[in-house]
Structures are given as C-alpha cells and as structure tokens.
Image: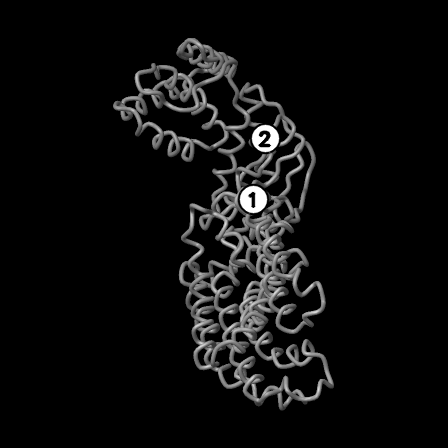
C-alpha cells in the first residue's frame, strides 16, 4: 500500500488537528505558566533538563493517542478481512505498515514540544539529553502494538476511545503514588526532575521501556505467531518475568528519585590560585573575569586584616552540581560557591560572592552546634557572630551576612537583643586604632566563642 493511501485511510490524519492543537496549546500555556519566556532564556539552561520539562506534559498523551489510533486501525484491518487474504506478506509487516501513522502521531506529540523547547532556548541537544525522548518513542511503539490487538478483540468504536482514556489515566495517575512507589517509575512518565548538570541514567529510562515493551512483544508473538512455535507459548511468562524484574528494581528507588548522574555540565575557568570555574550555560559566564577578581580581592583583604586564610586551588560554581546531595563537599583545596546565582543578580551586586568567600575563609579553633538546641546555652553566638561580622566588614559582605544571621536569630526569644549585641561588639573591634589591635581583638573573640560552646550531652561527641 502506498504511503499516500495509508495516510488517507488512517485515523491519525483526520484527528491530527485535535492532537496537534492540544500539543501547541499546552506547550505555550502550561510550560510557560510558572516561568515566562524572558526568565526562561535568561538561564540557567541545560539541555537534559529542558528536554525533560518539555516532555513532562506529553508522555501520557502520546501513549494514549498511539494506543487509541492503533486500536482503530487494528479494528479496520479485521473489518476489511485483511488476514483472510493470501499471505503475500507476513502478518508483522502488514501490521507494521498499518500502524505506522499511529506510531508517527505518538512520536510527533513527543518530538514537537522538544523541538520547540530547544529552538526557543537555543540549546544543542546531546545524545544523553535525548534519552527520555527515545524512551517515550519506544513506549509509543509498545502501546501501538497493544492497541492494535485490542482493535481485533473489541469493536473499534469501543476499543479506540476506551483504550486511549484508560492509558492516559493509568499513566498520568502514577504521579500520585507513594506506596507502592514503583508505578511512578515504570509508567513511562519520568517524575524525577533533572537538575542542572544532571542526566538520566540508563536504568532510569530502560526500566519503564522494558516494562512496556515486554507485554507488547508477548502480545505480538501470541497474535501474529504460529502456534507450533515454542516462543509463542514462552512469550507471556517471559514478559511477566521482565515486568517483575522492572518492578523489583524500581521498588528500591525513592519517590521522584530515579537514578541520575551529576556533574556533566561544561565549565569555563580563569585565573590561578585560585582558579575560578563557572557553568558555561548558566547565564552569567560572561562575568567570569569579574567574579574571579572579586574572589581574589576578597581573599587578599581578609589576609591583610589578619584572618588566617587557606587560599584554595579551585573555586567552582555550585550550579555545576545544582542538587546539593550530589555535590562533592568543599575542601581546603576546592570550594563550591554559588557563583552563577550571585553573579546573575538583577542589581549586579557581588556582595553574595564576597559573603560566600567569607564563610569559607573564617574558621575557628573549635566546632559549634549546627542547630540551636532548646535549653542549651547559645551565649557563644554573640562572640562568634561578632568576629565574623567584623571580617564581613573587611570585605564588604556585611549586608548579606546580617540578613542571614537576623533570620537565624528568629529562633531565639531575645533575637533582637542578640543582633544589637553582635553589632555593638563588631563595632568595638572595628574602632580599635591599629591593624594589630583589630586582629588581636578578632582572635580574642574567636577564643571567647569557643570557651562558651556548651559541652555535648553525655554519650555524644
């Protein structure tokens, strides 16, 4: 059958205005509802993340359309008694030709939003960024096979709409599951977000694909195969085994936690001692030289003030590992700072970068509680924060530091008094006449803060 004749007789063609219109509407409405276009293109932009966002609304829709159209075309094959004709071609080839428009419709529903998203963000996709798209296209084929079989079992007028609605509901509803969690991960609708610098691992896309492909292959083997062939009988239990394996693997994944790998975003670096690196597609890399100078200047000012600073070898943009859980910890040689986030501020103020350098530079000869414990002494806070505030004034980071600490003081009953005392002590240190006296005062405040740290409860260290 010629291509033109296939398209003319397929339900995919005369229903195209409906599903294409829905794709276009959802793309320009839903995808830009929470993030306008101007904010989107400003960054940070990461191809795997944008491909995933573009597909999120269309997984269930593409599977439903493919299944419904295939059910209609499968029923048409049965109605036209195609299988009663002389077998000039294999049943698989005949079914593949008949289902091609249905599969193409499902593919277009996935391809259109991805293509439009990449065009508007001007991103060049990588093979890894297109893994979710490839997964979805594979699952579309699986649902088309199942739909074709349903069209042979029930009348097309019933099978087509009911199968489309059932598939859409089943896939879309999996996002509400938390116990058990595996339906979220095997449905073919990736509910795990890809942060900047992350890519979906092979298992994240293979598990849902195999979960859908296994029963589809079993259906194809049973429906189109020869009963004397042993694989026709073996196909259903084999499919159940594959699906059970997928369920077992996905059951170990947390909610919205399919496997991803981090640290794939490219960076651009400048300078030495420290070498400063920022994300290329973060939206602020053009300020790399300015950021590098700001970091170097802040370190020099702290050293000149008498702060014992260990200059790192590398200062790296934390955006490269946007998700904190996947980010390597900062060390003496490598610091992870929010360079893009602070450099991309609308007001152009780099105080946030100076603040981040400050917090990584000022150290104490003791450890402090990571959280305020009710009933435990918090007297150390005044001396600790006064010393850090004094250093913050040296690099011009006092505003972000005070804003951060003021929010923390809200946990204290006398937060206002603590803030006033911290300001008073820091001002006293800054008012000392010589640099040596100011440095000595800073070291004394550090020692006082350490003496006031409460002893940990018995049995804890």
Residue 309, quarter of picture? top right
- Distance from the alpha carbon under mark 2 to that under mark 1: 14 Å
Most foreground residue, 108 or 309: 108
Q: Residues within 10 Å of mark 1 (few under 14, many from 20)?
A: many
- Left or right for 361, reference 422: right
Most foreground residue, 368 or 221: 221
- Left or right for 404, reference 16: left
* Image: 49 above or below 260: below
Residue 450 appears in the rendering = yes
Return the x and y of residue 440 as percentages of the image width and height. 49, 12
Figure label count: 2
Most foreground residue, 44 or 460: 460
* Image: 152 above or below 51: below
- Left or right for 111, reference 444: right
* Image: 453 above or below 108: above
Q: Residues within 10 Å of mark 2 (few under 14, many from 20)?
A: some
Q: Which mark is residue 57?
A: none
Most foreground residue, 25 or 150: 150
Q: Coloured how?
A: one colour
Q: Residue furthest right?
A: 88
Return the x and y of residue 254 as percentages of the image width and height. 50, 43
**Location of mark 1 (residue):** 319
**Location of mark 2 (residue):** 330
């Amino acid at each position: 059958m010629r291509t033109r004749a296939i398209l003319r007789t397929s339900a995919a063609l005369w229903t195209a205005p409906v599903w294409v219109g829905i794709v276009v509407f959802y793309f320009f409405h839903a995808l830009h509802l929470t993030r306008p276009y101007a904010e989107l293109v400003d960054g940070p932009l990461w191809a795997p993340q944008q491909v995933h966002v573009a597909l999120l609304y269309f997984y269930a829709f593409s599977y439903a359309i493919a299944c419904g159209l295939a059910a209609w075309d499968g029923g048409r094959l049965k109605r036209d008694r195609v299988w009663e004709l002389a077998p000039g071609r294999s049943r698989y080839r005949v079914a593949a030709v008949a289902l091609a428009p249905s599969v193409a419709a499902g593919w277009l529903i996935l391809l259109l939003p991805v293509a439009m998203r990449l065009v508007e963000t001007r991103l060049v996709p990588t093979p890894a960024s297109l893994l979710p798209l490839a997964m979805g296209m594979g699952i579309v084929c699986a649902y088309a096979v199942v739909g074709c079989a349903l069209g042979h079992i029930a009348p097309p007028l019933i099978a087509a709409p009911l199968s489309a609605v059932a598939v859409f509901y089943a896939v879309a509803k999996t996002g509400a599951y938390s116990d058990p969690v595996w339906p979220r991960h095997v449905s073919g609708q990736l509910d795990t977000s890809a942060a900047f610098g992350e890519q979906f691992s092979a298992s994240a896309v293979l598990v849902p694909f195999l979960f859908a492909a296994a029963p589809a292959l079993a259906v194809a083997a049973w429906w189109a195969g020869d009963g004397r062939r042993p694989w026709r009988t073996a196909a259903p239990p084999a499919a159940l085994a594959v699906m059970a394996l997928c369920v077992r693997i996905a059951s170990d994944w947390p909610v919205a936690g399919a496997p991803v790998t981090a640290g794939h975003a490219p960076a651009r670096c400048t300078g030495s001692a420290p070498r400063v690196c920022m994300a290329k597609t973060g939206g602020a890399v053009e300020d790399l030289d300015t950021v590098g100078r700001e970091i170097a200047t802040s370190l020099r000012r702290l050293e000149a003030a008498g702060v014992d600073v260990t200059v790192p070898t590398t200062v790296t943009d934390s955006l490269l590992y946007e998700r904190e859980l996947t980010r390597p910890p900062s060390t003496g040689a490598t610091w992870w700072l929010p360079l893009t986030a602070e450099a991309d501020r609308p007001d152009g103020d780099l105080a946030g970068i100076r603040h981040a350098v400050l917090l990584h530079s000022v150290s104490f000869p003791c450890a402090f509680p990571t959280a305020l414990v009710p009933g435990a002494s918090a007297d150390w806070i005044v001396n600790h924060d006064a010393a850090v505030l004094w250093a913050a004034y040296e690099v011009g980071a006092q505003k972000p530091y005070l804003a951060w600490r003021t929010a923390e003081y809200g946990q204290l009953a006398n937060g206002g008094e603590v803030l006033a005392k911290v300001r008073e002590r820091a001002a006293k240190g800054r008012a000392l006449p010589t640099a040596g006296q100011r440095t000595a005062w800073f070291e004394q405040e550090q020692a006082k803060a350490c003496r006031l740290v409460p002893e940990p409860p018995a049995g804890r260290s």
